[in-house]
Image (cartoon, rainbow, N blue to C red):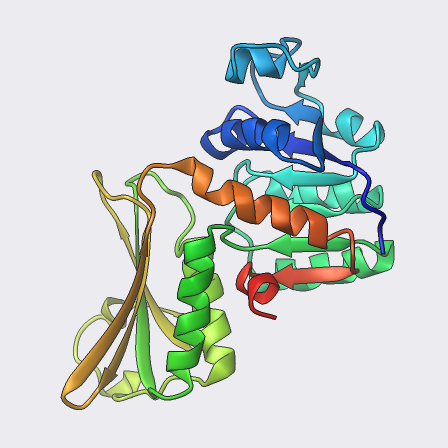
Amino acid sequence: MPSEETIAICVSGALGGVGRRLVAGVDAAEGFTLHSAVARREAGRDVGEVVLGRPLGVPITGDLAAALDAGPDVLIDYTHPSVVRQNVDLALSRGIPVVIGTTGLFDADFEEIDEASRRAGVGAATGNFSVTAALLQHLARIAARHVPQWEVIEYGKADKPDVPSGTARELAEMLAREAAPDVPLPEDELIGPREARGAEVGGARVHSVRLPGSSPCVEVLFGMPGERLIIRHDEQSDSGIFVEGSLLAARRVRERAGLIRGLDSLLFA
């Protein structure tokens, strides 16, 4: 068990929407210090001056490998689906625990990350680190034990590349492990394009909507004869919602080896 010393955080994606809030959150939180800030622009500038308007003594770097070589305690990654796996591998190969806030990974990735983190003897955590999103997962898991038919719908901005979102994928896979949903009508009995019924993720139906004006949202619909239950989580343009959960995960990944999937598993274990 790690001691109560200050945890040094490397933030990858430090000038993104969540990354900026993390820089401020790490600076303000007791028990944490900002070790390094990685971003694709503003290299060499003090990240505090860019984000907070005051220096923190931490220069922005575009070289994640060099930042990790300098020995932070934990990497928190909020970057892009095209680079997140590489970033995670860089951290784990150096024995550095990682909190993965970036979406776009799949079950096969998570299995490999779990194996790599166990080999390294460190932890990794992934999921939507909003506390209310974790409540969505927790409450939906309870409902799935009692309602046999359900589907997931998620909404995102027009240019969001990953479909479904990581939150929706994680939710569908998690609920299917609780109790795979009943299939009211087999695919070979459908009339029309089968794609209209959504993608199959972990045995569940997931529908992704991509439109201008859409804020990130995930909802799971449970149906029984004569009644319906909807559990929905909306993000309302405040990237700060991920800071508390990300820092909680940063503490926990130092306490155990292997992959932790979902903030709900930390809050409600």
Q: In which image quadrant can residue 232 be found?
A: bottom left
In the displayed structure image, the side of residue 222 where residue 256 appears, left or right: right
At 71% across and 37% down in the image, what residue appears? 31
Q: Is residue 202 visible?
A: no
Instruction: Relative to 150, say whether 77 is above or below.
Output: above
In the displayed structure image, the side of residue 93 where residue 125 appears, left or right: left
At 49% across and 82% down in the image, what residue appears? 178
Is residue 17 or residue 110 the one in the foreground? 17
Looking at the rendering, in which quadrant would you find the N terminus? bottom right
Is residue 3 or residue 202 the one in the foreground? 3
At 34% across and 46% down in the image, what residue appears? 235
Looking at the rendering, in which quadrant would you find the C terminus? bottom right
Measured as percent of width and height from the top left, residue 47 is found at 60, 16
Is residue 245 or residue 18 the one in the foreground? 245
At 43% across and 49% down in the image, what residue appears? 162
Instruction: Relative to 172, say whether 233 is above or below.
Output: above
Measured as percent of width and height from the top left, residue 254 is found at 77, 51
Q: Is residue 86 visible?
A: yes
